Amino acid sequence: MTQSRQATIGEELELRHQKSADLYREALEVFPSGVTHDARFMRPFPIYVSHAKGSHKWDVDGNEYVDFFGGHGALILGHCHPQVTEAVTEQVQKGSHYGANHALEVEWGKLVQELVPSTRDGGKVKFVASGTEATLMALRLARAFTGKEVVVKMRGHFHGWHDYATVGMSEPWDAPSSNGVPLGVRQSMRAIPSNDISALEAALAPGDVAAVIMLLNGLSTAYLEQVRELTRKHGVVLIFDEVVTGFRYAPGGAQEYFGVTPDLTTHAKILAGGYPGGSVSGRADIMGMLDHREDAHWQRHERVSHPGTFNANPVSAAAGVACLNIVRDPAVQKKAVATADKMRAGMNDCFERHGIPGTAGGEVSILSVAFFNPRITGSELVWRFRGAMQLGGADFSYLGGMVSAVHDERDVDQTVTAFDQALQRLQAEGVV
């Protein structure tokens, strides 16, 4: 008798997700490649989610997942946290957009001032609608404040999708990660290796640098202190992009965690409790470039202008206030970290048990998975791994994910089991 062949990861995904497959076929007629965010593109197709609650979400086919996408990192309190949901529900009945100032934006800004080290002691806040807008505004402020144009960034650090952020994002480092970026923009950016003080010294030496912008993931206090010292010595604005790390590493973000304070900080994601919203905050003299003055020359030629239809909109402000009032308690971050540590330990046991070279790592509540010698690399590896995890009832983002403060022991067990089964599938298909 012929032994039946086990379905491949792709085949089983199609079998279990027929409604998602149907929706994807419709989406291909509407959106380029059928998706509204690059990270949601997947083979054979992405899942379509119908609802979510806490640490779980469900797709249109009725499959349930432990969620590690976490709203692209925005949901440290999980989906539909009752206090955030209540605040939003109350606000939408009062109005979604006043086209005017309101009390919630003041309360929201005060919380940023209180929690973020770079914004204490008289620092100021400016709200925007996203992380991409936040980093774009921070770069403009630094250039205006210093009168210089070049920005130094670290290779591979993601700062959104605007033109400047595409430079030095992926190899080859001298080519933007997207088509359509003007040569002049590329020439104003200088991408260097991270964790290399000599490279930073060389990048600052010409004296034409307005700012250094960087992520803080995986760095050390010693290195960041050196960066802080060098930028201060050269009169360069130091920008910490805390769109992801803000309020996740500690109530005051990664700058509190590492004990190093920048001149400006960018936030989004957790800042707005899972709703659209971002901010730039920091030194009052730099933020003062946004001030209105009774000086015609200043207003027209020196001031940094900034409109923005959805800046500090009341719904996002309500969510942000509710969220920040919860995450100001360090127990929130500690709970997420403790859960992530248990997951890492269980997943590393799986690597060892199956004899697969790899590791489950990451910092604080951010999980990352690395395969040391995979036979398939790049996007194909990501799609296969994520698909295999979905079949086990866990949805990862790329080769990793975000752990929230509401993931629990059952989620740990289910995720480790899903990972164990995923490794078996990947091994059987010759991926690892």
Image: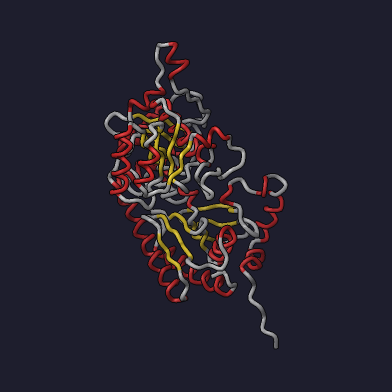
Q: Position of residue 39 (x, y in %)?
A: 56, 51
Q: Position of residue 11 (x, y in %)?
A: 66, 67
* 218 lies left or right of 387: left
Locate residue 286: give its quadrant: top left
Q: How many marks?
A: 0
Residue 139 position (above or below residue 406): above
Residue appearing at x 47%, y 76% in the figure: 354
Query: Is the image coloured rainbow, by chain, by secondary structure, or in one colour?
Result: secondary structure
Q: Residue furthest bottom?
A: 1
Q: In this rendering, would 431 be left or right of 82?
A: right
Is residue 420 shown above or below 264?
A: below
Residue 331: horizontal and vertical position, in percent? 30, 51
Residue toward you, 139 or 348: 139
Is 296 located above or below residue 335 in the figure? above
Residue drawn at x 55%, y 44% is: 175
Residue 320 visible to an observer of this rendering: no
139 to the left or right of 49:
left
Give the x, y percent position of residue 329: 30, 47
| Frontmost residue, 419 versus 318 | 419
| Residue 239 seen in the current view | yes
Residue at horizontal 48%, vertical 65%? 371
Q: Please determine whether, in this image, residue 254 is positioned above or below residue 11.
A: above
Q: Residue at x 65, y 60 (%)?
A: 44
Image quarter hosting the N terminus: bottom right
On the picture, is 129 further left or further right than 37? left
